[in-house]
Amino acid sequence: MSERYESHDVDVLVIGAGGAGLRAAIEASAQGARVGVVCKSLLGKAHTVMAEGGVAAALAHVDPSDSWKVHFKDTMLGGKMLNNWRMAQLHAQEAPDRVRELERWGAVFDRTRDGRILQRNFGGHSSPRLAHVGDRTGLEMIRTLQDFGVHQGLEVYMECTVTKLLKQDSRVVGAFAYWRETGRFVLFRAKSVVLATGGIGKAYTITSNSWEYTGDGHALALGAGAELIDMEFVQFHPTGMVWPPGVQGLLVTEAVRGEGGLLRNATGERFMERYDPKRMELSTRDMVARAIYTEVKEGRGSPHGGAFLDISHKPPEMVKKKLPSMYHQFMEFANIDITKSPMEVGPTVHYIMGGVRVDADTGAATVPGLFAAGEASGGMHGANRLGGNSLSDLLVFGRRAGAGSAAYAAKAPGHGVVDPAQVAAAERELLEPFERASGPDPYSIHRRLQQSMHSLVGIFRTEQDLMKGIEEIVKLQAEANAVRVEGSRAFNPGWHLAHDLRNMLTISEAIARCALQRRESRGAHARLDYPNLNPELGDVNSVATLDGEAVRVSQSPLPRMPDELRALFATEPAGVQS
């Protein structure tokens, strides 16, 4: 088998080279494992970079009363108590150490007057908690992790797409992949695999995500027999650019609101007063996104179908210093000076709270040898993620998944045997589109999927829309199975999309079926036909598994929170806060 293909043997294979993947690789390497990192794009081209506003950690530099318990409580209330409590606890407790560690590795943060890491306000956080570097925090984190990781001797395989996880008996023993440039196949044999592939944004029309985000890790996990949880919870970031069309969906960081930006509708009204008078612009993302959507739908939107976000009342020098990326982004793309004029913004698909079900302490999935971290894993954020929590999440759980996968690899009996039948099936699946004399092209199927997801499985949902959406997805799956690709395997974007489509369709089906099953509105999941919280669903996860080609959904109870942590919520009923 390995004679036919290029092949590589590692102890731990990390799929994805964003913040979670790099942090996992660094940790596994530190534990003595030989680590391979595979990434679909170039090293450093990761969505971690889009997390501009900051990394949430209860350092208590600006508000001395902040603590892990307050951060834990904010995270649980933001997630409508649907979070895995143990993940939320570990995250709140360990985030400060992970941020300080990053600083030791060379990350440069903005400073308080006495030289400590500065922190800013963000939606849903009850203290200024976000350590930041202007509005380029994620970029600084990736730079630091990349520099540190490269010096640990990681083996990096760039522009390489993993299409299947390989199993021996019940455990994962490697992966089948291809080089994007040449189309040549490559085998990775590994004692454990970490999925850190990010999210699913390209299944939707308007998204802050770029081309890599096609649900690869979610689909790989399902294909290997793992469980996904809470896939109905898709976060629409309230503020993406809406104009000009070429940059539609491009992120406008929450830091603009954290630094005092105001949201107004076409009549000049500061409309958040009607939706969340207490927190206003610093309400949770699900609330602000639905507020903007409602304003537009009721005819009070901005000229291009969004709302106005205004920071021009602040001193120009302060805006340029605190929000340099936003200043340049609007100047270059929209010819708008944000120190003088408001920005036009609207909701954009940004993040998925759902993902691979993992063990909180080790990142282990429900299939032996498989681990997940970052956006590809589920449980940490419950029904809605707070801004800034993704950067600390990927540091905390990237490290834990790295340690868990290295410990598993150290005990593994050696590299498993690669089953030739699995490899042959993976190869056949990739080559079939070239062999068809006729068939639909992948681009039209992708466009129709995005439109269906946006209009039928979007910000507001109904049973009728969701059923229509599922029907449409199933129809598109049949078309995708007959897709035709022309040309050779070298430099063939149509072929890449033909593969990515299968992942997006599977994950879209999981999202829609989980959304249909959850008959209530909670966090990022809003049902017009079930507008209220259903107390009976307050302690159940949605579960998605693969049965042949079909996605099956069910529900399972949340792990019970210990009484001492439950006592923190005695003052406010669980799940009531928006």
Image (tube, rainbow, N blue to C red):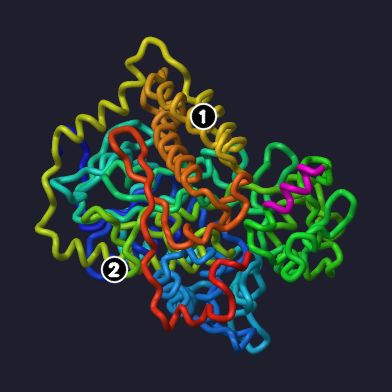
Judging depth in this view, the residue of 385 and 469 nearest the camera is 469
**Of helix, strand and loop, which mostly describes the magenta segment?**
helix
Asked whether residue 50 is in view, the answer is no
Three-letter code for the amino acid on which mark 1 is drawn: His
Residue highlighted by disc 2: 403
Mark 1 is surrounded, within 10 Å at the Cα level, by few (under 14), some (14 to 19) or many (20 or more) other residues, namely many
- The residue at 16%/65% (across/down) is 410
Judging depth in this view, the residue of 295 and 133 nearest the camera is 295
Residue 557 image point, x, y percent: 37, 60
Q: Are marks 1 and 2 in contact (CB under 8 Å)?
A: no
Q: Is residue 396 magenta?
A: no
Mark 2 is surrounded, within 10 Å at the Cα level, by few (under 14), some (14 to 19) or many (20 or more) other residues, namely many
Q: Is residue 489 above or below residue 383?
A: above
Three-letter code for the amino acid on which mark 2 is drawn: Ala
- The residue at 27%/45% (across/down) is 225
Residue extent of the magenta highlight: 290-298
Judging depth in this view, the residue of 44 and 272 nearest the camera is 272
Q: Is residue 433 above or below residue 348?
A: above
Marks 1 and 2: which is nearer the front? 1
Residue 327 image point, x, y percent: 75, 57
Q: Could you give the CA–CA distance between mark 1 and mark 2, rounded to whole angstroms?
A: 38 Å
Q: Is residue 161 above or below residue 272?
A: above
* Residue 446, numbered circle: 1
* Residue 97, numbered circle: none
Secondary structure type for disc 1:
helix
Residue 492 lies in what quarter of the image? top left
Which label's residue is closer to the chain start, 1 or 2? 2
Q: Is residue 158 left or right of residue 232?
A: left
Secondary structure type for disc 2:
helix
Residue 22 image point, x, y percent: 39, 60
Q: Is residue 294 magenta?
A: yes
- The residue at 13%/52% (across/down) is 415
